[in-house]
């Protein structure tokens, strides 16, 4: 085990197999099972899930024969990791559920809490976020009763991961920061302060870095992974160090709302990735090599070298395919979709990824892939399939309880229905979005929905209702006075009000609304509509269509408004939400 930690994988496996032979010859069943599980764990970190599965299955069999229920439960938990890696999450859940029954019968509360945490993680992996929360809360309660600080910290990390999967970025950040503080507690050993569990602290910091990137906080994400690099360097964990450097390389090349990479950071990124690749080749870690190749592809895409990026990503995809790593394979397809996101080939890659995620029952990632496909089809104006994609995505987001995702899908469908002139769908979808936004005190989506409700009311000859809706939009947007998006929406609402007032012969109010629209655009640095557009009258009985605030929004990026997908949106996949990434 020490040889493996230090990166000498071939010697480590040789030593463990020698120990296994000695245990077999001396008929030491428990030692034999322990050795089998140790070898299985090495294969797991190398990405060889079939060998992992074979060794844990044999260990479980030995424990049964030796009437060792504690060892059998440990083996089942290890076996579940192999099942998840092979794309069999429901089988993994069954294996951990069986382990939980055994540990309950033994009265081992600490081990029982571990099973509950595993079940939380596995249920989150397949999109059962409600069940995941229940298991996590139960595990956290057990850990609190037993005064187990580290176990409680592990539960906090899982809860943060669940919140991130449900789209609650702010909640995830708060949860993971609390977990980090628990994990960061130290103890004295040989007169030196050490972390209670450096590996778990590292995993917590990876999760925190991922949600920081989702929030556009690049500097904080980099800081987290730099801490992980220092931790594994100090603990002489060669595999952990290689993993940290690979992830750091991607972050250093990324862009966030708080800055872009400098020349020095790009050079450091290249050096980190080279060091990680060399270490993983030396360790014989093919899964790690695949991650490095994937990272190189992502970095090329971030730099605008899409062809070079695609070549590397295809290479990573093929390695994952050889390893039978379905999640890695799907992730490579997702990144290829991003690399070709201005072409129809991007659709093909996203569709392939959706198929894989569906086959391995990962609804969270399937929904994410559908969302990226919907955005691409919208950009390509693929009207034949874009509505179905967004409705499929909406169905998954509803099923897994991702309220944030549901609102995003509804917003996209409202815009599509508006463009096609389907006022019935616009009204129904907008009402649903408004109710959801109101429950969550979400002024942005509430104003979006009300703007479209007001627009339809005006089209349907209900000026009183339209005026009321549009004034409420303006009030909601006033809560974000510096947001370019809110100012664009305010201007569009005043434009609509001006046209309604004109139709009613309320000239002074119309002129005042037009002046307010111009003032809102000026405050946001937005282009004013042309005179012809202003003076052009509507068809009889219908208000003119004002400049759409979505189009105005594209004229100036607003980092302080909503988070929008970009090249960096794939980076959270590199950092990983789900089961712990391999060294």
Image (cartoon, helix red, strand yellow):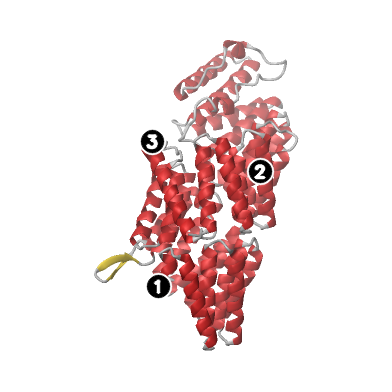
Q: Is residue 560 left or right of residue 501?
A: left
Judged from the image, the secondary structure of the residue bearing numbered disc 3 is: helix
Identify whether 325 is placed above or below 197: above
Judged from the image, the secondary structure of the residue bearing numbered disc 1 is: loop
Taking the spot 59% from the left edge, 64% from the top edge, the residue there is: 49
- Say if residue 383 shows up in the picture: yes
- Distance Cα–Cα, label 2 vs label 3: 32 Å
- Distance Cα–Cα, label 1 vs label 2: 48 Å
Q: Along the line of sight, which residue is nearer the eye, 57 or 201?
A: 57
Judged from the image, the secondary structure of the residue bearing numbered disc 2 is: helix
Q: Along the line of sight, which residue is nearer the eye, 392 or 66?
A: 66
Q: Determine which residue is flagged by label 3.
A: 263
Mark 1 vs 2, N-terminal side = 1
Q: Is residue 215 left or right of residue 507?
A: left
Where residue 439 appears, as percent x and y from the top left, is 56, 47
Q: How many marks?
A: 3
Identify whether 259 is placed above or below 9: above
CB under 8 Å between discs 2 and 3: no
Mark 1 vs 3, N-terminal side = 1
Q: Along the line of sight, which residue is nearer the eye, 232 or 469?
A: 232
Q: Residues within 10 Å of mark 3 (few under 14, many from 20)?
A: few
Taking the spot 61% from the left edge, 86% from the top edge, the residue there is: 65
Taking the spot 40% from the left edge, 62% from the top edge, the residue there is: 237
Q: Which of the two marks, 1 or 3, is nearer to us in this view?
A: 3
- Say if residue 104 shows up in the picture: no
Q: Which of the two marks, 1 or 2, is nearer to us in this view?
A: 2
Mark 2 vs 3, N-terminal side = 3
Q: Residues within 10 Å of mark 1 (few under 14, many from 20)?
A: few
- Distance Cα–Cα, label 1 vs label 3: 48 Å
Taking the spot 66% from the left edge, 50% from the top edge, the residue there is: 396
Please tell me the numbered disc located at residue 147: 1
Please tell me the numbered disc located at residue 349: 2
């Amino acid at each position: 085990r020490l040889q493996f930690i230090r990166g000498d994988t071939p010697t480590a496996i040789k030593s463990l197999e020698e120990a296994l032979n000695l245990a077999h010859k001396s008929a030491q069943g428990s030692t034999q099972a322990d050795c089998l599980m140790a070898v299985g764990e090495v294969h797991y970190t190398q990405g060889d899930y079939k060998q992992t599965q074979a060794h844990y299955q044999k260990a479980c069999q030995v424990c049964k024969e030796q009437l060792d229920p504690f060892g059998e439960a440990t083996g089942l938990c290890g076996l579940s990791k192999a099942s998840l890696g092979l794309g069999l999450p429901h089988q993994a859940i069954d294996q951990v559920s069986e382990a939980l029954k055994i540990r309950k019968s033994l009265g081992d509360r600490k081990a029982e809490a571990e099973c509950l945490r595993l079940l939380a993680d596995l249920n989150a992996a397949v999109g059962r976020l409600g069940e995941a929360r229940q298991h996590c809360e139960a595990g956290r309660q057990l850990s609190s009763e037993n005064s187990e600080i580290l176990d409680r910290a592990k539960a906090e990390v899982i809860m943060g991961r669940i919140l991130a999967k449900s789209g609650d970025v702010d909640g995830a950040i708060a949860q993971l920061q609390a977990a980090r503080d628990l994990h960061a507690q130290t103890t004295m050993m040989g007169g030196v302060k050490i972390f209670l569990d450096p590996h778990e602290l590292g995993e917590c910091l990876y999760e925190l870095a991922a949600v920081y990137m989702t929030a556009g906080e690049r500097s904080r994400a980099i800081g987290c992974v730099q801490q992980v690099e220092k931790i594994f360097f100090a603990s002489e964990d060669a595999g952990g160090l290689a993993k940290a450097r690979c992830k750091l390389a991607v972050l250093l090349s990324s862009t966030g709302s708080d800055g872009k990479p400098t020349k020095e950071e790009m050079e450091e990124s290249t050096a980190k990735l080279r060091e990680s690749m060399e270490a993983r080749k030396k360790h014989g870690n093919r899964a790690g090599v695949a991650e490095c190749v994937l990272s190189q592809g992502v970095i090329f895409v971030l730099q605008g070298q899409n062809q070079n990026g695609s070549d590397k990503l295809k290479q990573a995809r093929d390695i994952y395919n050889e390893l039978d790593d379905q999640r890695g394979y799907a992730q490579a397809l997702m990144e290829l979709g991003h690399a070709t996101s201005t072409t129809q080939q991007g659709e093909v890659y996203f569709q392939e990824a959706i198929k894989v995620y569906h086959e391995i029952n990962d609804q969270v990632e399937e929904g994410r892939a559908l969302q990226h496909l919907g955005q691409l089809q919208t950009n390509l104006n693929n009207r034949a399939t874009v509505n179905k994609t967004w409705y499929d995505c909406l169905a998954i987001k509803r099923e897994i309880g991702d309220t944030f995702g549901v609102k995003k899908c509804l917003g996209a469908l409202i815009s599509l229905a508006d463009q096609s002139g389907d006022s019935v769908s616009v009204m129904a979808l907008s009402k649903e979005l408004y109710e959801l936004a109101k429950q969550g005190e979400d002024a942005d989506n509430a104003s979006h929905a009300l703007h479209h409700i007001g627009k339809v009311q005006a089209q349907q000859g209900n000026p009183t209702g339209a005026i009321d809706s549009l004034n409420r939009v303006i009030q909601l947007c006033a809560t974000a006075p510096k947001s370019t998006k809110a100012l664009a929406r305010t201007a569009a609402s005043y434009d609509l009000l001006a046209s309604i007032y004109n139709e009613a012969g309320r000239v002074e109010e119309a002129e005042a609304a037009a002046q307010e629209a111009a003032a809102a655009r000026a405050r946001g640095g937005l282009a004013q509509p042309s005179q012809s557009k202003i003076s052009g009258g509507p068809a009889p009985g219908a208000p003119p269509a004002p400049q759409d605030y979505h189009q105005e929004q594209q004229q100036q990026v607003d980092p302080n408004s909503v988070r929008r997908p970009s090249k960096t949106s794939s980076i959270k996949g590199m950092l990983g939400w789900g089961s712990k990434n391999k060294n």
